[in-house]
Amino acid sequence: MKLRKIFGALLALGALEGCDIKGSCKQDAECPEQQFCHTEVKQCFSSRYSDLKILTLGENAVVGGAPIQIQARLELESGANPVYPPQLNLTVTPASGGTPTTVTLSRTAEGTYSAEWTPPPGEGTYTLQVAHPASWGPTRSVQVTVDRTAPALAVQVPEAQPATPKDGFSYADPMAGSAWVRDQTVTVLVESDSADIDPASPRVVVRGHNGDTDVTDLAVRQVTPCTKTYCGEVDVPLWRPGLEAFRGTFQIELAAKDRVGNERSATGSIPVTRWKWAFDGASGPILSTPAIGEKGTVYFGTSGTNGKVFALNPEGTPKWEAPLGPVSGSPTVGRAPDGTERIYVGAAPATSGGVLFSLNGNTGNTISQCPEAGRNLGWGPILSGTTLFDSTLGPGLPATETAMAFSHRSAVIILGPDVNRCGSLGSFGTMPGSSVLSRGLDVYYSSAYPPDPPFEQFMITALNFTLGTSSAKEGYSVPEPRAPVTSMAFAQTGTETYLLTAEGESSSNSGGIQAFDAERGNNATWNYPSSFSGVAPVRNLALGAGNVLFFGHEVATGSAPLTAIDLFATAPRLSVPNAGSFPGGPVLGAGGALYTASATGPAAGIGEVSAWGSNNLTLRWKLSDSVGRAQATPSLDCARQADGTPAAQSKGVLYVPALDGRLYALVVDSPGLDKNAPWPKYQRDARNTGNSGTPITNCP
């Protein structure tokens, strides 16, 4: 304001006198060096610059050790010509004494200057002065504190606390009792005693085991109350990092900065296991494949003289048990008209011999049985799985759920609990663990005569159930397999449907796979290998996408190959030697995994459970130190929420039945069965229906 008043007075004076004033000018060159010629009043004034500002640092700023961009600006007095030097000088002087350092700020625009400054290595207070290169030019100084100390940081991983064994369940991995389970989420605590930590800076990486897939998108949230200056938490879903092993360790790496950018890292370890739980029914070996209900309930039977049928909740608690006697065949999950799950299972009560039961899935109470209670028709134990299909007793009558299974001697048993149907057909026996399949109203089963070795004749029968009666399938010629059949599957190629059979006879050391026309029967259209002689029995198979078959062999000692072969091919696409001994079959899981359970292992009573890549049969992991030997095919389900609905995690649970009477629940990397596989396991689907029309699974 003062300068404007002077300008005004000078203008008026010049107008009155009409003459030059002392100190007047027409250009800057006519003024002393430190002055400028005002463009309007033509008078020399000092100084040309009204201010010099440091733009990027305030007084008493705190900076870290990272380079800083220093910016400054020269501002002109009103009326001054825009004359700027090519550079400004920055001098940094330690408050504690010492030699100053200088940095040149280069002009980046009219009046604006910039340079990168790296704070000195020593901590402390420094004076930063920016100055015009001429001695008469303006200067500006600020006090800056250099802080190179990173904030304190600690990672606290809580120790896993497995539940106390109860009701036949054990939850701790016997070889890694304090490990977290792969399907759990562990909350890791982040702590700091530093007052200047930036609460938005913590970031975390969870390293997969042995270089497997990392997780980098987890967020740390600040929490209160807090016993430290800063507390944060991060939830680590243990199913996400890579784990190509049964047990492993995830490394959690945390980094955080203070408010000036100093960074510190801290690490922690999370031991992880796939062991979820084991259940001991204390009632004999488990000889059959468990069935999975709609909400993940696991149904299975034990084969001791006090054999029982069990229903277990997926989290590892009992639901019910039914003391029905020895169970040899696999249970099947059906559905009552009111939507309640209905469990079909064959047992051998002491007073009745072989009986096919239907049980209430909620309570385990018997709904009906065939034959009725107290009758022993000499059928012997029911050795096969059970197939389910809908049939009707007459024109206009509603279709009702019908179950069919095969006993050891002289009976194919039919049970229709909603219409009090109970009956038997045939006089042949079957092999333990054999399949009974259905396709529409056609039912297929394999049989042997006599029912005990040495066998003389084998056959595959197809029956049609129409209007309450059964008859031989029209146009179907009963084929004769080369050896007893324990497992079957349907395959589709174009418009043709084939029945695939897994065959083998231990006494003659012969085994292999055949394919028969499912509509017409007749002789086999394909055999693998061409000769079964000298080949260990094939007891089970799985059929994947593209009609690729997977199977192993059962051997009394040692290990046999695991094979993948294209349907109708003459040579395998892949074969892994010494993979195990497999009375049960492989299981195809979602995500390209194949699971097997072996009847032999590294020590007495110890079996092996393995995960393979289904596209290349590469071994992903193996458990061979704490699981019993398996006689039957495992079952596979997705992870479940508390209410039984599928969880949103990309993991599942493999249920392995063992000869030691335990059912093992292992967390695997497949969220249920492979829906793209035509026949991913024994009896095809999670419910064990053996029906080609049943959904594979209710998992996502």
Image (cartoon, grey):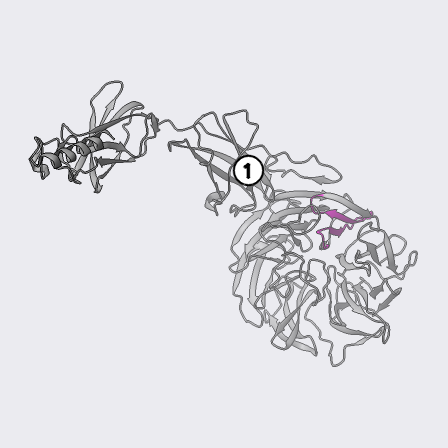
Query: In the figure, 235 relative to 329: above or below?
Result: above
Q: Nearer the viewer, residue 306 or 489?
A: 489
Residue at numbered disc 1: 271
- In the image, taking residue 152 as reference, residue 620 lies left or right, namely right
Residue at x 65%, y 56% (from the top left corner): 699
Number of marks: 1
- In the image, taking residue 252 as reference, residue 688 lies left or right, namely right
Residue 227: give x, y in percent of width and height. Answer: 54, 24
Q: Nearer the viewer, residue 669 or 574?
A: 669
Query: In the figure, 263 relative to 508: above or below?
Result: above
- Kindly indicate the quadrant of the structure image that contains residue 150: top left
- Find the magenta span and give its range: 293-316
- Kindly indicate the quadrant of the structure image that contains residue 283: top right
- Kindly indicate the quadrant of the structure image that contains residue 71: top left
Q: Nearer the viewer, residue 607 or 456?
A: 607
Image quadrant where one finds the N terminus: top left
Query: In the figure, 274 relative to 631: above or below?
Result: above
Task: Tell whether position 306 is magenta.
Answer: yes
